[in-house]
Amino acid sequence: MKLFDKIGREFSGYNILESGKRLIDRKPLQCSLYVTDRCNLDCAYCTEYDNSRPHPSLDDLKKWIRKIRELGTMRIALVGGEPLVHPNIVELVRYCRELGFATSLTTNGFLLTRKLLAELEDAGLQVMQISVDRMTPSPITKKSFKTILPKLDYFRDSKISLHITGVICADTLPESRAVLETGLSRGIPTEVRLVHADPLQRFRVDRGPREELESFIDSMIERKRRGEKIHTSEAILNYQRSLLRGEHVEWTCMAGYKLFFVSAQGKFWICSMVHTDKHIMDVTLDDLYANYRKKSCQEGCGVYCAVSASLLVEKPVHVLGKEIVARAKRIPSMVRRSLTPDSDKATHGTMRNADGTHEMNGSTKSGPSADNGVSLRKSA
Ligand SMILES: C[S@@+](CC[C@H](N)C(=O)[O-])C[C@H]1O[C@@H](n2cnc3c(N)ncnc32)[C@H](O)[C@@H]1O
Ligand code: SF4
Ligand code: SF4
């Protein structure tokens, strides 16, 4: 890819006009739609799957997707359960794109094949988040690079932007640094984030030692400031550090307003943790606006996509400014690389895959994501 294209892609996540509209009007920025509750794995920290439930039908999902668009929502994140177990996932992506959504999909990647990726790309999928918690599977989580590394090659010429997200808990912490390095060293925007708070004690995991977690977050803040492709915004890294320190953070939760969730039964959910019985088909813009308020569950909230979108809407200049500065710091290394003869590039391990293949396509931009309300990209 040419140097100017690469630099352009670095900032293409910021469609200022389109996202700017959502910062000043009353319409929602993003919806996360559970396309199924079913999942092929059973991560010990997860409360978001239920194999006793059938997939929602394609017709129902399409009806809900139309309604979500009618509300003015700009981006849709297809989540679950595991979205790739839904038999109509490609058609759903195509439908979202036809309606004009910026579309992402979050997956554990186990069912991803080269053919399926090509079909999703053809359907118009823009962003894929693959969840990777460890280098090797454990009884707590099977989402590891052992499964995903061989699949990264599928993205080499793909238009789909890939990013990698891991959960940090006591089980994964000893490998979280390696997960981060493995993703970053391949040029893939990568993040590892603290497991959500567990007020109802439903998870089967420990969070991990506070001091170690804090020093890890500190190191990521430093690397982010240096311009490394850590996918989390600095605002959310700082937020996670405050959570660990038990510090109060001043913010207003925009969940249920600027972002919301729709369950696999079509129910309107404020966020992944706070559910309502109202059907999405009955939701109005006034209902959404009524959720523009501080929430009683804010203290210690670990729904980072909601925190992220809320901070963005509250302080757009501050949040976007820092992200743009971090990305701008990548430009000198791109220029240096573009001036390096091809024969020398093979020695630059940070720009190539460890197996010697090319830098991943899609690695230079971030986009709509189930868990990222900060980096905004072009809508369709
Ligand atoms: C619920 S999963 C659904 C999509 C897909 N099955 C997957 O694992 O990527 C969406 C994201 O939420 C993350 N997640 C699930 N439970 C979590 C928790 N308790 N704390 C933090 N992240 C969590 C997963 O690791 C994944 O990145
Ligand atoms: S995190 Fe994803 S892969 Fe793991 S159990 Fe939950 S839905 Fe399934
Ligand atoms: S504060 Fe957190 S848990 Fe409560 S509604 Fe907002 S996002 Fe959901």
Image: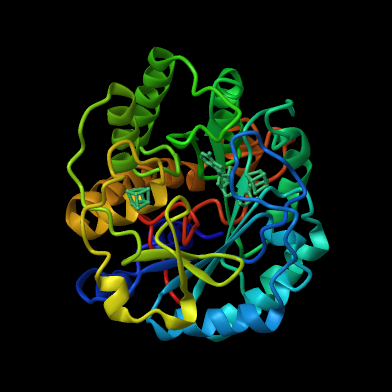
Front residue (pair 117, 228): 117
Residue 80 image offset from top left, x and y in percent: 62, 57
Q: What x and y, as percent, mark residue 362?
A: 57, 56
Q: Residue at x 49, y 58 (%)?
A: 369
Q: Quadrant of the N terminus?
A: bottom right
Residue pictured at 36% horizontal, 53% vertical: 306
Q: Is residue 325 left or right of residue 55?
A: left
Judge by depth and name the residue closer to the eye, 49 or 314. Answer: 49
> From where the camera sits, is residue 184 visible?
no
Q: Nearer the viewer, residue 156 or 210?
A: 210
Position above or below: 206 against 363: above
Q: Is residue 128 left or right of residue 91?
A: left
**Residue 107: percent from left, percent from top:** 65, 53
Q: Hey, which quadrant is residue 256 in on the image?
A: bottom left
Q: Is residue 320 visible?
A: yes
Q: How is the image coloured?
A: rainbow
Residue 247's spot in the image, x, y percent?
A: 22, 28
Query: Where 220 falls versus 256 (above or below)?
Result: above
- What residue do we see at 34% from left, 35% from top? 237
